[in-house]
Image: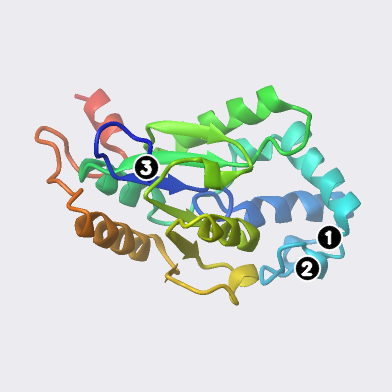
């Protein structure tokens, strides 16, 4: 059951590993800390970064370095098509609710929130709500997208529909699965159409994630 206005169809969107390429950004930080090349750290990695030789304590140290000192969350690359697809879904009447667990360690919250908002603006990602929390089943949405196996399991256990955004560490998780954002768009529109929650693009708005930049140049 969604918690948007009226009968709006709510899409709960995870950030890291779905919109933002956390692996690519964290890889740069870990490589620099170790004095090695990023290519020495495999992209095909497990959830716990065991292939990079990280235990829990070392991961937390490096993540703290990446977020608090390097301000990695401001500069993470976005996945191709993410912003454009979310704009098209928003135009179709889908309520975009960003849900992220970036405050899981009790430090640097102001920087994390600020860098997250700045990243969303720079990446041109549209959203109506921005939620920082770890217990995602408590956030009302009609359908979710996530990459973390434990989040997907918890959401589904609570009766939620979840799209798996394809990553090496979730290969064993059952679908529906999207390997790119065009596939995400199709799955969300199908789910919304089944509930008769899709509408045409609002008149007067052009398509594309860079629409605001184009309008400012008029």
Category of crowding for the residue at label 3, using alpha-carbon neighbours closer than 10 angstroms: few (below 14), some (14–19), many (at least 20): some
Q: Which residue is mark 1?
A: 36
Residue 142, percent across and down?
37, 49
Q: Which residue is mark 2?
A: 40
**Which of the two residues, 206 or 161, is positioned nearer the viewer here?**
161
The number of numbered badges drawn on the structure is 3
Image color mode: rainbow
Q: Secondary structure at mark 3?
A: loop
Can you tell which mark lies on residue 2? 3
Establish if 149 lies above or below 28: below
Which of pointers 3 and 2 lies earlier in the amino acid sequence?
3
Nearer the camera: disc 1 or disc 3: 3
Q: Give the residue displayed 85% in from the left and 49% down from the top.
A: 33
Establish if 89 lies above or below 127: below
Q: Give the residue displayed 72% in from the left and 39% down from the top.
A: 104
Q: Give the residue displayed 42% in from the left and 65% down from the top.
A: 180
Name the residue at the bottom extreme: 172
Nearer the camera: disc 3 or disc 2: 3
Give the Cα distance between marks 1 and 3. 46 Å
Work out whether residue 101 can be spotted.
yes
Residue 63, percent across and down?
78, 45
Q: Secondary structure at mark 2?
A: helix
Horizontal side, residue 124 vs residue 149: left or right: left
Horizontal side, residue 50 vs residue 177: left or right: right
Establish if 129 lies above or below 25: above
Horizontal side, residue 51 vs residue 164: left or right: right
In contact (CB < 8 Å): disc 2 and disc 1: yes
In contact (CB < 8 Å): disc 3 and disc 2: no
Category of crowding for the residue at label 1, using alpha-carbon neighbours closer than 10 angstroms: few (below 14), some (14–19), many (at least 20): few
Establish if 48 lies above or below 215: below
Category of crowding for the residue at label 2, using alpha-carbon neighbours closer than 10 angstroms: few (below 14), some (14–19), many (at least 20): few
């Amino acid at each position: 059951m969604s918690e948007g206005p009226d009968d709006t169809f709510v899409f709960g969107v995870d950030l890291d590993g779905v919109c933002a390429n956390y692996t690519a950004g964290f890889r740069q930080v870990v490589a620099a800390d170790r004095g090695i090349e990023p290519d020495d750290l495999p992209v095909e990695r497990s959830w716990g970064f065991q292939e990079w030789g990280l235990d829990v304590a070392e991961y937390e140290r490096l993540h703290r370095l990446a977020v608090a000192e390097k301000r990695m969350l401001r500069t993470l690359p976005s996945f191709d098509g993410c912003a454009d697809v979310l704009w098209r879904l928003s135009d179709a009447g889908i309520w975009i609710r960003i849900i992220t667990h970036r405050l899981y360690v009790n430090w640097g919250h102001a920087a994390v929130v600020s860098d997250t908002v700045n990243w969303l603006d720079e990446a041109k990602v549209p959203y109506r709500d921005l939620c920082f929390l770890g217990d995602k089943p408590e956030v009302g949405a009609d359908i979710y997208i996530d990459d973390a196996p434990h989040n997907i399991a918890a959401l589904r256990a609570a009766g939620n529909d979840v799209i798996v955004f394809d990553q090496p560490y979730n290969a064993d998780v059952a679908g529906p699965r999207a390997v790119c954002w065009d596939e995400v768009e199709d799955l969300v529109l199908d789910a919304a159409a089944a509930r008769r929650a899709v509408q045409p693009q609002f008149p007067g708005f052009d398509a594309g994630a860079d629409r605001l930049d184009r309008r400012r140049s008029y």
